[in-house]
């Protein structure tokens, strides 16, 4: 495509990107509000709500900002039409919310991950240009893949007599199923990249804490792997 034609196409998509950013912002608001509701009454450290009128616009600036940014970028980098852009954005929002919540609290809300799993099963295979069963296979593969590492971690902890330490949280299995469903035929790439990113995050936590005891933050890495796959697979 000639340079001037490409530039014209990008300029024409700018209003669409701005509108998409607004949609992403409000979808991020919705998932952040749902997460606040789920945190009510449990023992996880909830994020302090923003008081006053600002709460009508802002529930979680990180989630909403990331969601708006992803939705704004999609029209420029994802080929296809408006339907595919919207489906890609819908897949991205639960990834962002789960990643932020898991990083903050080391806790995965099954409701949020379940919504992401349902969206992945519904549109993941269409976004990646496959058959419907590829999303089912991706979800099953993600569940089995992380399930194996979860069981291996529990065995390692028992052999080393590390007490109640978790080598990997059980919620990571749910996240892997969600990412696998949304990635469909690209699930192997998403899970591999996600494990690498999760390993880097875990290493960072170990270095900061100077201890190998505790839960590895694989969830955020897996979600980042899923996000990367939406753009490059």
Image (spheres, rainbow, N blue to C red):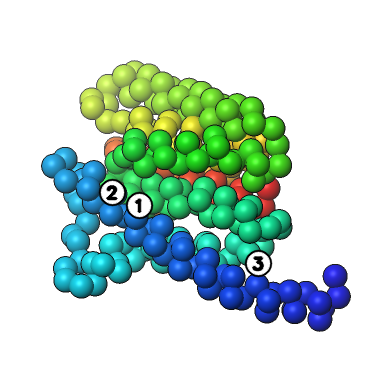
Q: Is residue 87 left or right of residue 203?
A: right
User: Residue 90: where, in percent of width, then height?
Assistant: 50, 51
* Residue 31, numbered label: 1
User: Residue 128: where, in percent of width, then height?
Assistant: 67, 43
Q: Give the crowd class for mark 3: few <14, some 14-19, many >=20 residues within 10 Å.
A: some
In the image, 208 versus 7, the foreground residue is 7
Mark 3 or mark 2: name the one nearer the start of the chain. Answer: 2
Q: Is residue 193 left or right of residue 6?
A: left
**Element on which disc 1 rests:** helix
Asked if one can make out residue 124 in the rendered structure from this viewpoint, the answer is yes
Please say if the residues under marks 2 and 1 sit with CB atoms less than 8 Å apart: yes
Quarter of image, res 80: bottom right
> In the image as oriented, which residue stretches furthest toward the right?
2
Please tell me whether residue 146 is drawn above or below residue 199 in the rendered image.
above
Q: Residue at x 64, y 46 (%)?
A: 127
User: Residue 136: where, in percent of width, then height?
Assistant: 58, 28
Quadrant housing the N terminus: bottom right
CA–CA distance in space, label 3 to label 2? 30 Å
Q: Which residue is mark 3?
A: 76
Asked if one can make out residue 217 in the rendered structure from this viewpoint, the answer is no
User: Residue 197: where, in percent of width, then height?
Assistant: 51, 48
Q: Which residue is mark 2?
A: 35
Q: Residue at x 63, y 59 (%)?
A: 82
Please say if the residues under marks 3 and 2 sit with CB atoms less than 8 Å apart: no
**Element on which disc 2 rests:** helix
């Amino acid at each position: 495509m000639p340079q001037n034609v490409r530039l014209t196409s990008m300029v024409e998509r700018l209003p669409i990107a701005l509108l998409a950013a607004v949609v992403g912002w409000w979808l991020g608001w919705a998932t952040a509000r749902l997460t606040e509701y789920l945190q009510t009454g449990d023992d996880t450290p909830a994020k302090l709500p923003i008081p006053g009128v600002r709460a009508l616009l802002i529930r979680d600036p990180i989630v909403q900002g990331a969601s708006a940014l992803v939705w704004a970028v999609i029209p420029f980098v994802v080929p296809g039409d408006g339907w595919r852009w919207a489906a890609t954005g819908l897949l991205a929002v639960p990834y962002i919310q789960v990643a932020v919540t898991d990083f903050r609290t080391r806790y995965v809300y099954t409701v949020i991950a379940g919504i992401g799993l349902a969206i992945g099963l519904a549109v993941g295979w269409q976004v990646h240009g496959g058959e419907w069963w590829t999303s089912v296979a991706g979800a099953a593969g993600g569940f089995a893949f992380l399930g194996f590492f979860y069981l291996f971690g529990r065995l390692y902890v028992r052999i080393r007599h590390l007490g109640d330490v978790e080598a990997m949280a059980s919620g990571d299995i749910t996240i892997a199923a969600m990412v696998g469903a949304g990635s469909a035929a690209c699930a192997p790439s998403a899970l591999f990249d996600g494990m690498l990113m999760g390993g880097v995050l875990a290493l960072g936590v170990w270095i900061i804490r100077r201890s190998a005891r505790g839960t590895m933050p694989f969830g955020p890495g897996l979600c980042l792997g899923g996000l990367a796959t939406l753009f490059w697979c």
